Amino acid sequence: MCGIIGWVNTERDLATERDTIQKMTLTLSKRGPDDTGIYMSRNALLGHRRLVVVDPEGGRQPMTRWVGGNSYTLIYNGELYNTGEIRSALRAKGYHFKSYSDTEVLLVSYIEWGAECLKRFNGIFAFGIWDKNKKSLFIARDPLGVKPLFYTQVNGSFIFGSELKALLANPEVEPVIDGTGIMELFGLGPARSPGCGVFKGINEVPPGCCLTYQGGAAKLERYWQLRSMPHNDSLETTTEKVKQLLVDAIERQLVSDVPVCTFLSGGLDSSAISAVTADYYKRKGKGSLNTYSIDYQDNELYFKADDYQPNSDGVWAQKMADHIGSSHKNIIINTPQLVQALQDAVKASDLPGMADIDSSLYLFCREVRKDATVAISGECADEIFGGYPWYTRPELIGATTFPWSEAVKERKSLLLGDFQSLPLEEYVHSRYDATLKEMPGLEGESLSERRMREILYLNLKWFMITLLNRKDRMSMSNSLEVRVPFADYRIVEYAFNIPAEMKLYGGREKGLLRNALKGILPEEILERKKSPYPKTHNPAYLKAVQDWMWGILRDSSSPIHQLVDYKTVSEIVESGGLSFGKPWYGQLMRGPQLLAYLIQVDTWMREYGVRIE
């Protein structure tokens, strides 16, 4: 995994801007601590930071290949999991390769097939290719959006990169937000509208899209889209196909020249990945697998089971580790660490995020990175196979807004009087409505079947991408690559058309997935009720974020005063977040997490010098 940055201007000589492109590239050093490279020409500057995972020598970037008097230069962040198949197809066409890296295969694929190469890739990626003769830039992002890719057009320049901080390191890009940015932060945050970079003028290439920039014009196109089709497979056939697709996805993603580990909570998803990986390691004679879980100091003293979090992970993770024979490590986070890392999480994301849900992952990845360079994680199974309450609870299924973020009216109440005139509720509804309108329907579907397809589509386009963004930023800011096999586009394409009734087989959340994992997981893990990512229940955490937020409110120079109503937020802080009434976001961002989100907004505005227009 890596970090990329590029600057193209076909009307200006950029050759004098070496210092600027170096500065921009340096901001991505944590994404790529092992190597750095710069490509410079009159009209294009490309920068690359590399985390070495495969082929240390052969995968160096920027990578240039000459064909018929023209050069193509690539910067690339990601992994192709079908490199071997593509290389074989290109060799059959007469191409020769100097390395075994996927980088060279990707570049040659574009030279041979152009944008059509994207339809051949199985992987996670964000890349840019500069065609010197045509003075044309081509950039693209993987189908599910696992890897980030931001861009902006300013003063005749096109600037793109892996993270917002890299774009903002260019003096021509300013950290400004307008009404739209405010509505993103307070109406949708920590989610973002597809393609929105929150900062004014900054966009993100949506998942499954590519962009060509030539002659001062940018053309954005979608190359991958889900299709609605009748599902004619029986339960038995469907179960077997899901199992085959998942095992294949996991095993493809174990290719690495550096140590690979797995995240293991003892839940269904991480246990499946760990079990398949451990079995693969044994068959290949690679020794025992290292697995990692997270918990919080003294959490057992304060944990109280509820419908969302029926039990804690510790015992289950160890049971699973014993079952597969992994070398397991439980990483314990204490409250002071968790609070302090709220700032680190903002700097990793370049935006306010999921509060301590982010900061805990940041600390967890920091510890895992001491032992490993690559980890495999269970993200996306809940979205794809029906693991959340909004797949099973009628009141959430029937919600007229995003079911994980219903408190739109309450969110607006936080804003300062000047911003109460913003059409925040209408904005959120328009984003919700637009997503449903773009969903491919299926003729003859009942209203209930269509609604369940809508819930899935909303999850894929919104909730899942929020979690993928979180995982990418928190891991890569610690130079740890995390792969997510459930986000294999083949699994998503197949699962998109499986009826909800079949997915909820046996009346259970992820019932079909449980059925597919029989024989891979022990019965007690298969039957364990879903428990989300663990959070701290220590009252010391609430006290810490309350004290911090009081300090922010009492400091008249705190930038958040430009956005929020003092009286409303004071009441929320006094109540520990309870006066807000509803979760801020999802199942986990309640009470203390709302206060932490506001802390992150203030931190973000201060650290990034954010201006409001």
Image: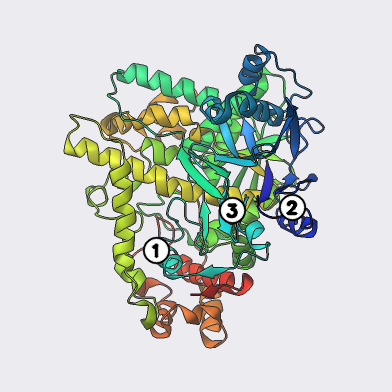
Q: Quadrant of residue 111?
A: top right
> Spatial distance from mark 1 to mark 2, Cα to Cα?
33 Å
Height in image: 184 above or below 312? Answer: below
Residue 280's quadrant in the figure? top right
Q: Residue at x 51, y 27 (%)?
A: 119
- Work out whether residue 63 or residue 347 is closer to the camera in this orientation and state it: 63
Its colouring scheme is rainbow
Name the secondary structure under disc 3.
helix
Residue 415 lies, in percent from the top left, at 39, 76
Which one is earlier in the sequence, the residue at label 3 or at label 2? 2
SS for callout 2: loop
- Contact flag, marks 3 and 2 (Cβ < 8 Å): no
Q: Which residue is mark 3?
A: 361
Mark 1 residue element: loop
Query: Distance between the Cα atoms at labels 3 and 2?
Result: 19 Å
Residue highlighted by disc 2: 29
In x, y percent, where is residue 277?
60, 28
Reading the image, the residue beneath label 1 is 584
Amino acid on which the number 3 mark rests in the picture? Leu
Q: Are the two marked residues, 1 and 3, in contact with CB atoms closer than 8 angstroms?
A: no
Whole-percent x and y of residue 590? Answer: 41, 64
- Tag 2 or tag 1, which sits nearer the N-term? 2
